[in-house]
Image (cartoon, grey):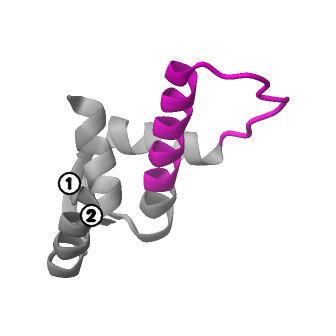
């Protein structure tokens, strides 16, 4: 049922405009540019969740680097609702 609700939300919202401070935006861009080296091996559930959040952060960094609009010490990005949701979930 949650997926069905998500489909409706995505169809109605799609993207949201988000304003981020420079330090946050630069950290997200750095996450996108970082290389992961080595074998991951066995992961705990917590490690998997952290890696998934790191991937979400890196994708937001990609959006910032490709389409971010800098206004002084802030950047504006049009973020897809799934990435925005991932960021909100990480803050809870």
Q: Are marks 2 and 1 in contact (CB under 8 Å)?
A: no
Query: Which residue in the structure is indicated by mark 1?
Result: 19
Span highlighted in magenta in the image = 34-61
Return the residue found at the far bottom. 11
- The image quadrant of residue 16 is bottom left
- Give coordinates of residue 27: x percent, y percent: 45, 37
- Foreground pick, 60 / 3: 3
- In the image, what residue occupies the spot 48% across and 30% down? 49
User: What count of labels does the image hold?
Assistant: 2
- In the image, what residue occupies the spot 74% across and 22% down? 42
- Foreground pick, 48 / 83: 48
* Quadrant location of the C terminus in the rendered image: top left
Find the distance from the CA under tag 2 to the CA under tag 1. Answer: 14 Å
Mark 1 neighbour density, 10 Å: few (under 14) some (14–19) many (20 or more): some
- Give coordinates of residue 50: x percent, y percent: 50, 28
- Give coordinates of residue 15: x percent, y percent: 25, 72
* Relative height, residue 12 to residue 35 (above, below): below
**Dominant secondary-structure state across the stretch colored magenta:** helix
As drawn, the label of residue 81 is 2
- In the image, what residue occupies the spot 54% across and 44% down? 55
- In the image, what residue occupies the spot 37% across and 64% down? 68
Relative to residue 58, is residue 60 drawn left or right? left
* Quadrant location of the N terminus in the rendered image: bottom left
Is residue 55 in view?
A: yes
SS of the residue under disc 2 = helix
- Foreground pick, 73 / 90: 90
- The image quadrant of residue 10 is bottom left
Return the residue found at the far right. 38
Return the residue found at the far front. 1
């Amino acid at each position: 049922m949650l997926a069905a609700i998500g489909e409706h939300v995505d169809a109605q919202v799609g993207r949201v405009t988000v304003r981020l401070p420079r330090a946050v935006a630069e950290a997200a861009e750095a996450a996108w540019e970082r290389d992961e080296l080595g074998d991951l091996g066995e992961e705990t559930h917590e490690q998997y969740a952290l890696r998934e959040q790191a991937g979400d952060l890196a994708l937001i960094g990609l959006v910032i680097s490709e389409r971010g609009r800098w206004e002084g010490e802030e950047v504006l990005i049009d973020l897809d609702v799934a990435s925005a949701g991932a960021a909100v979930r990480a803050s809870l």
